[in-house]
Amino acid sequence: EAQVTQNPRYLITVTGKKLTVTCSQNMNHEYMSWYRQDPGLGLRQIYYSMNVEVTDKGDVPEGYKVSRKEKRNFPLILESPSPNQTSLYFCASSNRGLGDLDTQYFGPGTRLTVL
Amino acid sequence: AQTVTQSQPEMSVQEAETVTLSCTYDTSESNYYLFWYKQPPSRQMILVIRQEAYKQQNATENRFSVNFQKAAKSFSLKISDSQLGDTAMYFCAFMSAPSGAAGNKLTFGGGTRVLVKP
């Protein structure tokens, strides 16, 4: 089954404690992105990757890091989380193409609370 | 930069009735894609419908249809014969074309919460 998985699904942590949210896709997609969802703002892109070892900032990258060492995995790293990073996070993957080939597949979301 | 605006934070509709969600966007590009995503209480993002800007014909998917007005930069979603399972948050989204820009970045509106009442 084609899917994007994220772990953990829920996380409560404290300010300053480093954490990593994992993302993995099994569709051999080149493109992967991280989004955060906040009330009234919809989803906003944090970082994206267009291939292994190729990453770039999205619209709201401050306080986040990513890496893409393997094509299937795209972890999101918060080295020193702060309360304003409390949010719902989504990983997404897709390919470049025409028609449905560039459809984004979303993971199930990770609810992060930073106290 | 593109922006997407959904002016209706919440809407309610009786079961079997029709509801229309508004979406406007701002872009200087001539070709792009527009999407409606559904997010039920499970939080999963589900693609409802997509529209290519170069196509004049409005997209339809079963009970879901769009009214795409390119000159007005408007992209509304109509849900016909509303069902209880349609209760969800709905997001309008924009993507540049040809695809590939910023990893197929989607720019989302703020969302419209739809409640279908029995």
Image (tube, grey):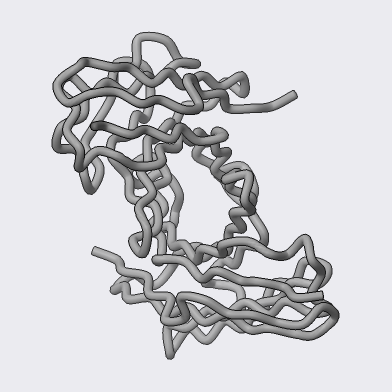
Give the position of the C terminus of chain B as an image quadrant.
bottom right
Residue at the spot 31% in from the left edge and 69% down from the top edge? B3
Give the residue furthest to the front: A115
> Relative to residue B35, is residue A53 depicted above or below?
above
Residue B52 lies in what quarter of the image? bottom right
Residue B18 coordinates in the image, percent (x, y): 75, 85
As drawn, B67 above or below A73: below
Q: Nearer the viewer, residue B87 or B50?
A: B87
Image height of A53 relative to B89, above or below: above
Q: Residue at x 55, y 33 (%)?
A: A107
The answer to which of A104 and A63 lies nearer the viewer is: A63
Residue in the picture at 39% in, 52% down: A43
Left or right: A20 in relation to B80: left
Q: Can you say whether A59 is above or below B70 in the image? A: above
The answer to which of B74 and B88 lies nearer the viewer is: B88
> Which quadrant would residue B15 be assigned to in this image?
bottom right
Quadrant in which the N terminus of chain B is drawn: bottom left
- Residue A17 is situated, as x and y percent measured from the top left of the image, at 20, 16
As drawn, is B90 to the left or to the right of A41? right
Picture mark count: 0
Percent x, y of residue A58: 25, 42
Q: Residue furthest top?
A: A69
Viewed as shown, does residue B48 lie left or right of A78?
A: right
At a point 14% along the width and 37% down the height, the residue shown is: A62
Report x, y in % for residue A48: 33, 34
